[in-house]
């Protein structure tokens, strides 16, 4: 990693993170645990995994890093916790398509916030990529997009805002390690879920699926995505995460034979090609 440019480091971290996230929807479909039980374990297991991992690496310096993150750490704890919760509640209160369309605005919001607060105006290639991918997302879910619950739609948009603010916060604190703040955020998520959880019991295949999902699809990606914006603009990091929209259904198709729609395949191809071209041009420039 020391021989790579910042553009290469950030792009690699964001890409690897989204590759770990892509089977997430498959694991969720395979699990039988109730929603808030899933939220609880998706907070608790990543918290314990990364917390003890960082204690092993940094020892008591973990707490020093946490407390010296200052207001950036506080903001990131808040946004990280909120987005983890609002995403689930949004899905519960509106159509999935509505939530995903709202979240697809995150790269655009990151670009706007980055321009205002960090004076990092995205170049023309990034703006074009953001617009093209957003249109592709809208195309994929147009048929299933319905007039959903206003409350759920708003929470979906809040999730997008939280993702953008979180990425901008990391970008503005490039010299600080905010992974400990994300760890605390996961603890807050698990604590909040305690007020709504119906059962803590994991039975049969959930004993394997839930811990595996929480480590591979939650713990590892959240560490990588917390580091990535230190090297590339927040809008570019969030752009990578639109790949999950197309690759996730492919996992479901391969494992449980739930075939994606033709719109998903067509729109997904546009997203893949757009991000590939954008990344190639940015990496060549770097």
Image (cartoon, rainbow, N blue to C red):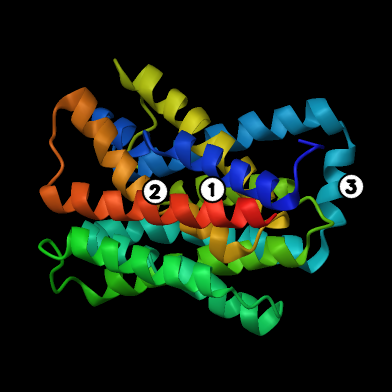
Image quadrant of residue 252? top left
Q: Which residue is drawn at 72% across and 55% down?
A: 230
Q: Position of residue 151 (x, y in %)?
A: 29, 74
Q: Position of residue 236 (x, y in %)?
A: 55, 60
Height in image: 267 above or below 234? Answer: above
Give the Cα distance between marks 1 and 3. Answer: 23 Å
Q: Residue at x 29, y 71 (%)?
A: 153
- Which residue, given by chain and number where applicable, does mark 2 sit on? 243
Q: Residues within 10 Å of mark 1 (few under 14, many from 20)?
A: some
Q: Residue at x 56, y 36 (%)?
A: 219
- Which residue, given by chain and number where applicable, does mark 1 sit on? 191
Q: How crowded is mark 2: few (under 14 residues within 10 Å), some or many (20 or more)?
A: many
Helix, strand or loop at label 2? It is helix
Precedes in sequence: disc 1 or disc 3 = 3
Height in image: 134 above or below 276? Answer: below
Precedes in sequence: disc 2 or disc 3 = 3
Image quadrant of residue 187? top right
Precedes in sequence: disc 2 or disc 1 = 1
């Amino acid at each position: 990693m020391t021989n790579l440019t910042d553009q290469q480091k950030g792009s690699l971290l964001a890409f690897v993170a989204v590759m770990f996230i892509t089977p997430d929807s498959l694991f969720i479909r395979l699990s039988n645990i109730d929603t808030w039980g899933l939220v609880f374990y998706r907070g608790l297991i990543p918290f314990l995994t990364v917390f003890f991992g960082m204690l092993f690496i940094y020892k008591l310096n973990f707490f020093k890093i946490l407390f010296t993150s200052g207001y950036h750490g506080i903001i990131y704890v808040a946004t990280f916790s909120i987005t983890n919760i609002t995403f689930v509640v949004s899905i519960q209160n509106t159509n999935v398509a509505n939530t995903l369309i709202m979240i697809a605005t995150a790269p655009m919001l990151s670009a706007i916030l980055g321009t205002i607060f960090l004076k990092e105006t995205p170049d023309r290639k990034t703006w074009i990529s953001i617009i093209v991918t957003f249109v592709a997302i809208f195309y994929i879910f147009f048929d299933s997009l319905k007039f959903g619950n206003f409350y759920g739609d708003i929470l979906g948009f809040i999730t997008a805002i939280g993702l953008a603010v979180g990425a901008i916060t990391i970008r503005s604190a490039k010299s600080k390690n905010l992974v400990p703040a994300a760890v605390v955020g996961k603890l807050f998520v698990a604590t909040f879920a305690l007020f709504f959880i119906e059962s803590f019991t994991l039975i049969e295949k959930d004993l394997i699926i839930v811990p595996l999902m929480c480590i591979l699809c939650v713990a590892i990606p959240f560490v990588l995505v917390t580091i990535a914006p230190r090297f590339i603009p927040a809008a570019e990091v969030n752009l990578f995460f639109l790949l999950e929209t197309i690759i996730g259904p492919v996992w479901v198709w391969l494992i449980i034979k739930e075939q994606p729609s033709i719109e998903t395949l067509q729109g997904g191809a546009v997203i893949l090609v757009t991000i590939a071209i954008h990344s190639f041009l940015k990496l060549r420039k770097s």
